[in-house]
Amino acid sequence: MRRSSSLPSALRAVIGSMPPLLLLALLLVLLAPPPAAATTLTYRMEPHERACFYTTAKSRGEKMAFYFAVQSGGSFDVDYEVTGPNNEDILAGQRERQGDFIFSAPDAGEHSFCFSNKMSTFSEKVIDFDVTAEHEQNASLNPVGHDLSGKEDAKAHVRPLEESVQRLHEMIGGLSRHQKYFRTRENRNFATVESTQNRIFWFGGSEAFMLVVVAAFQVFVIQAFFNKSGKARV
């Protein structure tokens, strides 16, 4: 009972000794909404498959980011197409290995991001991609889930936090882009090494088989030559 009664007193003492700015930052972190940032997805496409993914723009002119990279399969290429709410073409490409685009939504509504592997007869493709809308990014960067209109003191304390969060977000975004680039390079190099190993194996096996065939043919020729020589002497 004493321990339970002394704990709130100690907690109040610790909170009372904290600087106001640090206490405000702690409250903002606790009250912040869960992040809504986009996450890179991995999708495996079968031969002759067409797959579409969708996201919504809340207003016309909203910035949208689209990234993809073929990690493995065939020649590391895929067809892609981005269309707007009214089926208007925004982006399109054929046999592309990767792409990183930022565009403005022509209208509010659902946008489709489609990949096609119809050019492949037997090769499946593994694709990494992500799609980010501006309102999702702003929601993830907003450290306060409440309206601060008319609260100038709170705004003055929150503004440095928002700037710090923005800088951290830009730095993390740069690191994420580099990580995606190196991951793509690693996967493609690994696929190239694996393909080279398979070619070396089959080339070595074919060479060994040809040596056995040539050796057997030489033995047969020499044996036939001596057989003919023996018959001629008799």
Image (cartoon, rainbow, N blue to C red):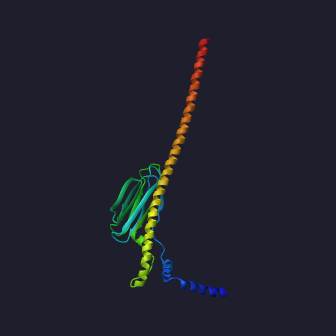
**Residue 108's image quarter?**
bottom left
Q: Quadrant for the C terminus, please.
A: top right
92 to the left or right of 179 = left
Q: Residue at x 53, y 45 (%)?
A: 197
Q: Can residue 125 be seen in this view?
A: no
Q: Position of residue 230 (x, y in %)?
A: 61, 15
122 to the left or right of 208 = left
- Residue 213 position (above or below residue 33): above
Q: Position of residue 150 (x, y in %)?
A: 39, 85
89 to the left or right of 33 = left
Q: Position of residue 69 (x, y in %)?
A: 44, 57
Closer-to-camera residue (131/176): 176
Q: Can residue 221 be seen in this view?
A: yes
Closer-to-camera residue (204/156): 156
Q: Residue at x 60, y 18 (%)?
A: 227
Q: Where is residue 68 in the image (x, y as percent from the top left)?
A: 43, 59
- Residue 16 position (above or below residue 103): below
Q: Quadrant for the N terminus, please.
A: bottom right
Q: What number of labels is visible?
A: 0
Closer-to-camera residue (176/109): 176
Q: Which residue is drawn at 38% across and 66% down?
A: 64
